[in-house]
Image: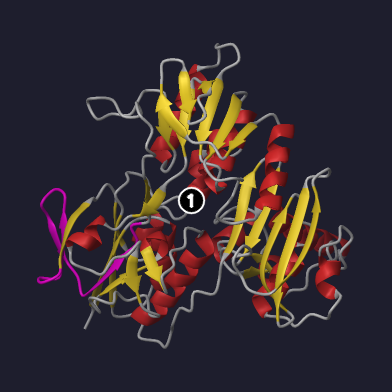
């Protein structure tokens, strides 16, 4: 008997699940995406704004791919309610769709910071204010930036100094806007790194022409600009909101599922309230933690695919790797370097703009933060993933600029794409970057591995030419 699986959401987690279930026997898969575009890579939206990527290049899988694999992809399909008693999804147009298994991959939504004047009396945003979550948001902001081409010294303020805020700030700076970042915490990337790394990032941004205000909050939109809680007013033509995202759980709450910050799931990504409903990605909460990054979302999708195929599979929440994709800034975070328990090995050089921190427990790397110089990130990630027991001097040597093997050829089993879990050997087996993307999905997550993938493919081409 064919089991009907309905996925609510058309983001990166939903696409990964569809890829894993394509061709699975006895499963009928429907994906409900509330946007009008085929699923795309949200992480690289800042590259579209910057002008280094075309919007079409962000498509993860085309509508044709879904059709070719027997998957019913419905675009612009907004879900209004979940009817658990009848096991039906209620669409905004009144239609109903039955399911045997329901997967919530609704992602996260931006939340408005408490800034007076942000929303006008008619409920719309102030015309200078932009969110940055979807392709529609990106295109609107891109048009606004283009309209300032004739404005002498156009200015922008980015509210939020997290990964997304820094990406958007760099994109606006590259487009020629005088950009300022406002972050309420005492340093940038406060959720991922410590104050030393945050200080290095702030210094790097200022060197690149972007002013940074930390420990300051935007409190009011005025005709003159945006006012901070210290009384200062930053004149601006644009304000971009990148702070305050939260899991999209409204459907789950109204359906009576257990929700804390996210939809609470067990080790099989199944709702603790209803064993016919699952959640993955930014909207899911496992062991009191939500994610927000591509690698754990894709790992969850792969585990859930196994569960839906009735295989033995479980999620332990162990994988967490984040990369910052922004011109002139290099950041990689493995695990939780701020809270992980263990001995800390740290090297900071604010003059050169680099900071490296390893947290080692029982000889194994349990967390890491690298800012400014990622030459050794491949080897460190390899040790982190494998749980390699290091000698007493190895952690320190890994953080030195001339770390052993930092620039050496990568072994075939070394992971080069943290998002998709792709090894150097899998990349070398491909004849082109396009083939690699299609076969392995490398570069389709955060994009941080793109240079390495191109290098590995070119190495194969050179080796083939030399053998002729």
Q: Spot the residue most to the front.
A: 230
Which residue is labeled 1 in the image? 41
Quadrant in the picture for residue 454: bottom right
Q: Residue at x 55, y 11 (%)?
A: 150
Residue 450 on image: x %, y %: 66, 53
First to last magenta residue range: 84-106
Image position of 405 with respect to 77: above or below: below
- Residue 161 within the magenta-colored segment of the rendering: no
Image position of 413 with respect to 143: above or below: below
Residue 406 on image: x %, y %: 83, 63
Q: Nearer the viewer, residue 377 or 23?
A: 377
Residue 59 visible: yes
Tell me if 37 is positioned left or right of 451 in this view: left
Q: Residue at x 23, y 58 (%)?
A: 251
Q: Spot the residue most to the bottom.
A: 312
Name the colouring of the figure: secondary structure
**Image quadrant in which the C terminus is located:** bottom right
């Amino acid at each position: 008997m064919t089991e009907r699986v309905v996925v609510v959401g058309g983001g990166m987690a939903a696409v990964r699940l569809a890829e894993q279930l394509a061709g699975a026997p006895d499963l009928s898969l429907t994906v409900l995406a509330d946007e009008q575009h085929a699923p795309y890579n949200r992480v690289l939206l800042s590259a579209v704004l910057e002008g280094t990527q075309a919007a079409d290049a962000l498509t993860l899988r085309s509508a044709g791919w879904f059709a070719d694999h027997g998957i019913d992809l419905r675009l612009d399909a907004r879900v209004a309610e979940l009817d658990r008693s009848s096991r039906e999804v209620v669409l905004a147009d009144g239609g109903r769709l039955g399911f045997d298994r329901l997967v919530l991959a609704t992602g996260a939504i931006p939340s408005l910071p408490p800034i007076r004047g942000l929303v006008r009396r008619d409920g719309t945003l102030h015309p200078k204010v932009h969110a940055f979550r979807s392709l529609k948001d990106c295109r609107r902001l891109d048009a606004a930036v283009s309209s300032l081409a004739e404005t002498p010294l156009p200015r922008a303020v980015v509210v939020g100094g997290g990964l997304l805020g820094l990406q958007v700030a760099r994109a606006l700076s590259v487009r020629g806007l005088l950009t300022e970042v406002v972050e309420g915490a005492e340093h940038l990337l406060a959720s991922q790194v410590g104050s030393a790394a945050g200080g290095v990032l702030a210094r790097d941004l200022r060197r690149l022409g972007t002013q940074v205000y930390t420990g300051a909050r935007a409190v009011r939109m005025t005709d003159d600009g945006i006012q901070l809680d210290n009384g200062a007013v930053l004149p601006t033509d644009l304000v971009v909101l990148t702070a305050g995202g939260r899991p999209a759980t409204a459907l789950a709450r109204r359906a009576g599922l257990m929700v804390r910050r996210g939809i609470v799931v067990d080790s099989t990504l199944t709702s603790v309230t209803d064993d016919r409903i699952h959640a993955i990605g930014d909207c899911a909460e496992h062991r009191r933690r939500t994610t927000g990054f591509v690698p754990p979302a894709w790992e969850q999708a792969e585990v859930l695919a196994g569960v839906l195929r009735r295989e033995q599979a479980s999620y332990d929440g162990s994988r967490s790797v984040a990369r910052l994709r922004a011109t002139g800034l290099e950041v990689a975070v493995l695990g939780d370097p701020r809270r992980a328990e263990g001995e800390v090995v740290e090297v900071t050089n604010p003059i050169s703009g680099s900071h490296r921190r390893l947290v080692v427990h029982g000889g194994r790397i349990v967390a890491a933060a690298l800012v400014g110089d990622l030459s050794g990130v491949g080897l460190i990630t390899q040790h982190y993933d494998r749980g390699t027991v290091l000698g007493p001097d190895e952690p320190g040597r890994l953080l030195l600029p001339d770390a052993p093997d930092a620039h050496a050829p990568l072994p075939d089993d070394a992971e080069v794409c943290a998002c998709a879990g792709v090894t150097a050997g899998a990349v070398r087996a491909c004849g082109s970057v396009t083939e690699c993307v299609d076969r392995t999905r490398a570069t389709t997550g955060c994009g941080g591995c793109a240079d390495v993938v191109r290098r590995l493919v070119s190495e194969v081409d050179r080796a083939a030419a030399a053998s002729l």
